[in-house]
């Protein structure tokens, strides 16, 4: 009987101590809930960046009451320090699967664009909200003017249709919305058949582009759909100076009998972290790529480096080639000195910045790895 009495006393004392310890968690949670309600009442859902503003308001509220006496024996700051530490299981962080619909995600991003942008010069743009002119801004950031321009330039594919073709490839047609000359335009476009071209004049790597074949000319017309836009030109397999479409036409720097004209895009490739792997892994070790070879097929033009901001152009024109002829398509290996220091990333970045073909068959780095 005496033992049962002691067990009961111990159980009661243990329960009281547990309640005392848990009280700090209840108090901290209660005050945080009050802070959230206060912020929700203070900042409505219609306010710009309301989630961020509510978070700041909640933090400010808790800071203001942090040292106030609560219930005669604690404060919020004291309760927060003594509250029950929750593991991921108590916070709902274990065995959680997040499923994302790529289709719905892209649709949401496309339909919730807040601004339309019209370029004025390299660092000034007109911002339109709901297609109504609001202001002119200057953009300054870590991005270069060219990078900022690429970020703000956009197109949205609204519909895709595939037609059974007579060749090895089906015809892919799209309805695309573009921001052209300060206004929304919708065009029906199609993809040219993909091929590893051996004819230097056959490729067509330009968006919303047109082709010209005819007599020698310096004037190309029929470009009304790109009015006011800067277009790139490939004349008989060679790049020409970009021009701005005016009155549906452009004047070429060099006369040509064949041309491709359209909006430029770049093709970018970045490897994962390199790993030698033949003896042991080099992951997480300090390495330096000091030399690199890239194996190309039917390629003209490429730049290589450790990242997009540090690229070295590869020379594809042979010293004995005629300067008035296009650079022949190259198949083979190109060796490049790699401009990088020591680090754990070991990344290789390759870019085709021109409207020219680039096919990569292999990347062969030579590197130094620390011994550990």
Image (cartoon, helix red, strand yellow):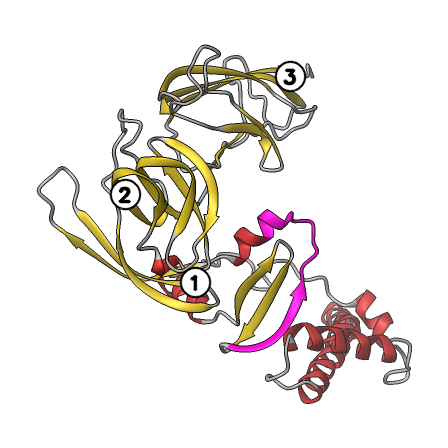
Q: Is mark 3 on a helix, strand or loop?
A: strand
Quarter of the image where one finds residue 354: top left
Report if residue 303 lies within the magenta region: no
Q: Pointer 2 and pointer 3: residues touching (CB < 8 Å)?
A: no
Q: Nearer the viewer, mark 2 or mark 1?
A: 2
- How far apart marks 2 and 3 lie (CA) works out to 52 Å
Q: Give the range drawn in magenta.
A: 132-148
The mark that comes first in sequence, 1 or 3, is 1
Is residue 64 among what the camera can see?
A: yes
- Which residue in the structure is indicated by mark 2? 212
Could you tell me residue 3's position as x and y percent?
74, 67
- Which residue in the structure is indicated by mark 3? 369
**Residue furthest bottom in the image:** 41
Apparent side of residue 28 relative to residue 133 in the rendered image (left or right): right
Could you tell me residue 247's position as x and y percent?
40, 60
Residue appearing at x 56%, y 21% in the figure: 281
- Which residue in the structure is indicated by mark 1? 180
Q: Which of 120 and 36 is in front in this view?
A: 120
Apparent side of residue 270 relative to residue 50 in the rendered image (left or right): left
Is residue 16 among what the camera can see?
A: no
Disc 2 packing (10 Å; few <14; some 14–19; many ≥20)? some
């Amino acid at each position: 009987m005496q033992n049962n009495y002691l067990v009961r006393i111990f159980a009661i004392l243990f329960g009281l101590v547990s309640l005392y310890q848990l009280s700090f968690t209840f108090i901290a949670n209660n005050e945080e809930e009050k802070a959230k309600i206060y912020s929700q009442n203070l900042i409505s859902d219609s306010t710009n960046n309301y989630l961020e503003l509510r978070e700041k308001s909640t933090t400010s509220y808790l800071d203001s009451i942090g040292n106030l006496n609560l219930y005669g024996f604690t404060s919020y700051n004291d309760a927060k320090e003594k509250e029950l530490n929750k593991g991921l299981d108590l916070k709902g962080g274990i065995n959680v699967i997040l499923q994302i619909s790529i289709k719905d995600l892209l649709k949401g991003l496309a339909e919730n664009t807040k601004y339309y942008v019209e370029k004025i010069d390299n660092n000034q743009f007109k911002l339109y909200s709901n297609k109504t002119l609001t202001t002119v801004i200057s953009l300054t950031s870590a991005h270069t003017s060219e990078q900022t321009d690429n970020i703000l330039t956009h197109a949205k594919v609204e519909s895709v249709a595939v037609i059974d073709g007579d060749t090895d490839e089906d015809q892919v047609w799209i309805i695309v919305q573009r921001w052209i000359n300060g206004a929304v335009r919708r065009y029906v476009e199609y993809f040219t058949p993909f091929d590893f071209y051996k004819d230097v004049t056959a490729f067509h790597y330009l968006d919303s582009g047109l082709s010209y074949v005819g007599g020698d000319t310096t004037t190309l017309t029929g470009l009304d759909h790109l009015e006011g836009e800067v277009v790139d030109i490939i004349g008989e397999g060679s790049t020409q100076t970009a021009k701005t479409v005016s009155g549906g036409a452009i004047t070429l720097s060099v006369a040509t009998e064949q041309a491709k004209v359209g909006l430029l895009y770049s093709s970018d490739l970045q490897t994962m972290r390199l790993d030698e792997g033949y003896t042991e892994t080099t992951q997480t070790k300090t390495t330096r790529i000091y030399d690199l070879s890239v194996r190309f097929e039917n390629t003209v033009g490429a730049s290589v480096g450790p990242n997009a901001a540090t690229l070295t152009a590869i020379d594809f024109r042979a010293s004995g080639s005629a300067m008035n002829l296009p650079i022949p398509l190259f198949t083979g290996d190109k060796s490049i000195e790699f401009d990088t220091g020591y680090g754990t990333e070991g990344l290789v970045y390759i870019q085709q910045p021109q409207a020219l073909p680039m096919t990569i068959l292999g990347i062969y780095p030579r590197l130094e790895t620390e011994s550990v």
